[in-house]
Image: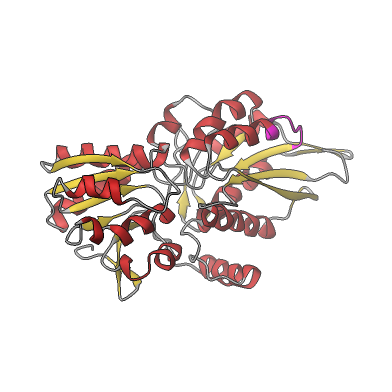
């Protein structure tokens, strides 16, 4: 990187379309990490945001674009698992390191990639904890699973079904939906005929909100609705309105700290929204970028008017992250790139807001 040029770091996720709340929120977290760490050896860090609308095809297209840029240093992303899965081999070939804030598909870290890492917990953890909570804490023995057909949603729903069966529960059926539609009465009616006590949904808030508003009309007025970390947030409440009452979702709590207090204050001052309104993942977007910038600082070499950030050394430094103080907790990466520090809680909508679900310590 020559003097006067910027150190480019990318964020990749949906910033337009039905899932834009996630991408906008996470990119803001990344941007605030850069505000706190604006340069590397005096060279300004530039955030390059690219929109995928959540699709794997766009994820691959953006990855190819970044891979062709010799000044692209690292990528905070991708945001969705399908987009991430499509991008990993492209970044692998280009030796561009990734740190995903939210891609939770289990096998992403078992592909042998030396560039892919994540600060989010994986879906097998979420599925196991959710199944146990549904069966042991809520006393539900008969569920149906629904999903949006995506790598994240379908994968998570299938993991929950398998885990629930292994715990002695009954899974009466699995029903896909087509994401982005406004009428899910047909798949809901199919599920209603099976008589589940609870529907577990793998997918995102926009589709979840349509499902819950149409459950009663499909004969599922007595069934519980249990979402995932893709459905949690204020956006779901806004979209679903009163139909959200009594529904559940997974939440990744951020430990209280002075740093997190400052982050929330800075977030609202910069963007006019309360942190957590769009999604719960802006702290993960921040931590993913903060880890990348910290590693880049470690390996950067300044020679005259040139800054060199060796890509392999950077990938190795990110993978070697240990005891890094992030907003989500203390981050340490294992040999496969699993770096999650956060735990899991299950939240319930009561009185129009999210509260901690019953029977959790």
Q: Position of residue 52 (x, y in %)?
A: 59, 43
- Where, by quadrant of the figure, is residue 223 drawn? bottom left
Task: Name the side, left or right, on which 168 lies relative to 221.
Answer: left
Q: How is the image coloured?
A: secondary structure
Residue 118 is situated, as x and y percent measured from the top left of the image, at 49, 42
81 up-or-down from 111: above or below: below
Residue, x 54% and y 69% (percent of image)?
A: 264
Q: Where does the magenta region start and end?
A: 65-71
Image quarter hosting the C terminus:
bottom left
Is residue 151 left or right of 137 when viewed as pictured? Answer: right
207 versus 174 height, above or below = below
Residue 66 lies in the magenta-colored region: yes
Which image quarter holds the N terminus?
A: top right
- Left or right? Give the position of 113 relative to 97: left
Q: Is residue 330 located in the magenta-colored stretch of the structure? A: no
At horizontal 68% and vertical 30% (from top left) the residue drawn is 67
Q: Is residue 217 left or right of residue 298?
A: left
Give me the residue at 77% from left, 47% from top.
41
49 up-or-down from 66: above or below: below
């Amino acid at each position: 990187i020559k003097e006067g040029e910027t150190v480019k770091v990318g964020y990749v996720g949906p910033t337009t379309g039905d899932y834009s709340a996630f991408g906008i929120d996470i990119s803001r977290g990344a941007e605030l990490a850069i505000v706190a760490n604006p340069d590397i050896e005096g060279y300004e860090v530039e955030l390059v945001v690219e929109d995928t609308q959540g699709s794997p095809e766009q994820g691959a297209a953006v990855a190819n674009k970044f891979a062709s840029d010799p000044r692209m240093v690292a990528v905070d992303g991708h945001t969705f698992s399908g987009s991430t899965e499509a991008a990993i081999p492209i970044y692998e070939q280009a030796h561009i390191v990734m740190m995903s804030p939210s891609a939770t598909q289990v096998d992403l870290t078992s592909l042998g990639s030396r560039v892919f890492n994540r600060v989010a917990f994986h879906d097998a953890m979420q599925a196991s904890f959710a199944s146990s909570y549904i069966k042991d804490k809520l006393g539900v023995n008969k569920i149906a699973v629904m999903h949006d057909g995506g790598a994240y949603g379908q994968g998570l729903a299938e993991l929950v079904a398998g885990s629930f069966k292994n715990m002695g529960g009954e899974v009466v059926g699995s029903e896909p939906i087509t994401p982005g539609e406004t009428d899910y009465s047909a798949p809901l009616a199919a599920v209603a005929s099976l008589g589940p006590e609870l529907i577990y949904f793998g997918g995102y808030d926009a589709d979840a909100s349509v499902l819950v508003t149409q459950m009663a009309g499909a004969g599922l007025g007595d069934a519980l609705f249990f979402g995932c970390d893709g459905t949690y947030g204020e956006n779901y409440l806004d979209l679903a309105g009163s139909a959200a009452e009594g529904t559940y979702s997974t939440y990744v709590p951020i430990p209280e700290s002075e740093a997190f207090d400052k982050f929330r204050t800075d977030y609202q001052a910069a963007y006019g929204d309360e942190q957590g309104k769009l999604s719960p993942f802006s702290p993960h977007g921040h931590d993913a970028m903060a880890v990348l910038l910290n590693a880049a600082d470690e390996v950067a070499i300044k020679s005259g008017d040139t800054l060199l950030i060796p890509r392999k050394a950077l990938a190795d430094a990110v993978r070697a992250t240990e005891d890094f103080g992030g907003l989500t907790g203390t981050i340490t990466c294992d040999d496969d790139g699993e770096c999650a520090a956060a735990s899991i809680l299950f939240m319930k909508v009561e009185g129009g807001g999210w509260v901690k679900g019953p029977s959790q310590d």
